[in-house]
Image (cartoon, rainbow, N blue to C red):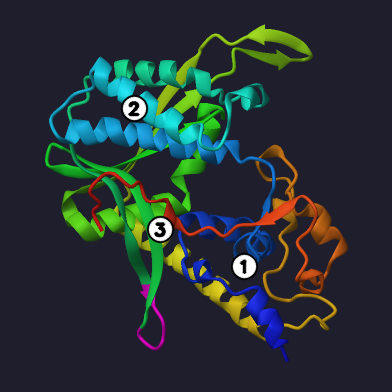
């Protein structure tokens, strides 16, 4: 029987909130999900990709909030957006650390944004909403309760009477790698279901808005070369038919059910078990995104990580993710 003190150690309100980010983590490796979202273990190193992305989203939200109000981007609006970016970014990462992040240097953000605005200034769509957040039922339990997925989308736009979700992504990947990862993503499935529930036949799916930063130089076969492009942009439309929307909704519900099954297994787990049956390891995820999983050494040496508790491994901190805490603060939300 599970130790009641152990239950208190791994209990946190954020565990009740499931969103696309968490579900993606579970798909990649259930054990990584356990470490990250049940125990709340995060590497102590600065998560620059996340910090840059959040700051960049704030800047673009300002651009499209002004657009919604009838104000196309002017030098003033762009300068304000850049100020919003640095206000957010510098609250976490000071200038003296910039050289540590050559793939997404913050000093290049203004040129990235101005180049983006120049590329898409002639967009014909109308911005209906910026920063959409809430929860979405993707199924029902046998008792009739909703299986809720929480979401946060960047904007809903309209063109030719069709509504579409515009979702911003900052990346240093190759454009084809990025495009491949978007089509079958959890966020795409959730967004397609959400838009259809809101607008029915007037929906046109997702429009992934990729902004790619390129380092000034890169190495090829040991030789340092200059990048031909400073920035790249790609918009990837994804408009699924109704049968495909339903098919991928069912996929997300299936993973939702598996996660709940692992939570049930965890509720009866014990530090005395020779191994933890809940949230099994997925060894195919040990080298995801061309880097070793941060929990690789912990997995290798601990068949039952409950025995580590209440200690937190060296190099890690405890920090829980709740998507509701990351809503932008200064625009009207559609919930």
* Quadrant where the image shows the C terminus: bottom left
Q: Disc 3 vs disc 1: Cβ atoms closer than 8 Å?
A: no
Is residue 1 in view?
A: yes
Residue 206 vs residue 81, the one in the foreground:
81
User: Residue 228 in the image: x percent, y percent?
Assistant: 54, 8
Q: Which residue is mark 1?
A: 38
Q: Residues within 10 Å of mark 3 (few under 14, many from 20)?
A: some
Q: Is residue 113 left or right of residue 242?
A: right
Where, by quadrant of the figure, is residue 34 drawn? bottom right
Q: Which residue is mark 3?
A: 324
Q: Secondary structure at mark 3?
A: helix
Is residue 41 placed above or below 15 in the rendered structure? above
Residue 288 vs residue 276, the one in the foreground:
276
| Nearest to viewer (mark 1 / mark 2) | 2
Q: Which residue extends farthest right?
A: 301
Q: Is residue 63 magenta?
A: no
| Magenta region, main secondary structure | loop
User: Residue 272 in the image: x percent, y percent?
Assistant: 83, 83
Q: Secondary structure at mark 2?
A: helix
* Span colored in magenta: 139-144
Q: Which mark is residue 81?
A: 2
Q: Residues within 10 Å of mark 2 (few under 14, many from 20)?
A: many
Residue 282 vs residue 276, the one in the foreground:
276
Q: Residue at (71%, 87%) from the top-left corner? A: 2
């Amino acid at each position: 029987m599970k130790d009641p003190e152990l239950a208190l150690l791994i209990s946190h309100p954020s565990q009740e909130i499931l969103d696309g980010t968490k579900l993606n983590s579970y798909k990649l490796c259930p054990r990584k999900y356990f470490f990250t979202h049940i125990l709340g273990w995060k590497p102590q190193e600065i998560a620059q990709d996340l910090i840059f992305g959040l700051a960049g989203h704030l800047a673009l939200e300002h651009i499209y909030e002004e657009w919604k109000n009838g104000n196309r981007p002017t030098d003033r609006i762009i300068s304000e957006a850049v100020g919003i970016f640095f206000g957010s970014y510098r609250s976490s990462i000071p200038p003296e650390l910039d050289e540590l992040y050559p793939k997404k240097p913050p000093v290049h953000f203004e040129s990235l944004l101005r180049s983006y605005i120049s590329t898409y200034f002639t967009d014909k769509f109308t911005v209906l909403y910026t920063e959409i957040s809430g929860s979405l039922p993707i199924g029902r339990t046998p008792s009739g309760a909703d299986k809720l997925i929480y979401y946060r989308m960047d904007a809903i736009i309209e063109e030719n009477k069709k509504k579409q979700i515009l979702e911003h992504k900052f990346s240093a990947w190759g454009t084809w790698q990025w495009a491949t990862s978007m089509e079958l993503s959890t966020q795409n499935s959730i967004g397609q279901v959400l838009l259809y529930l809101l607008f029915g036949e007037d929906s046109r799916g997702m429009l992934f808005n990729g902004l790619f930063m390129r380092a000034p130089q890169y190495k090829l076969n040991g030789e340092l070369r200059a990048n031909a492009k400073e920035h790249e942009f790609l918009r990837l439309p994804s408009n699924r038919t109704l049968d495909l929307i339903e098919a991928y909704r069912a996929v997300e519900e299936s993973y939702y059910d598996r996660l709940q099954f692992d939570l049930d297994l965890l509720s009866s787990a014990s530090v005395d078990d020779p191994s933890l049956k809940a949230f099994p390891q997925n060894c195919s995820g040990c080298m995801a995104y061309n880097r070793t999983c941060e929990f690789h050494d912990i997995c290798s040496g601990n068949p039952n990580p409950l025995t580590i508790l209440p200690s937190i491994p060296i190099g890690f901190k405890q920090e829980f993710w709740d998507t509701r805490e990351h809503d932008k603060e200064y625009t009207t939300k559609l919930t």
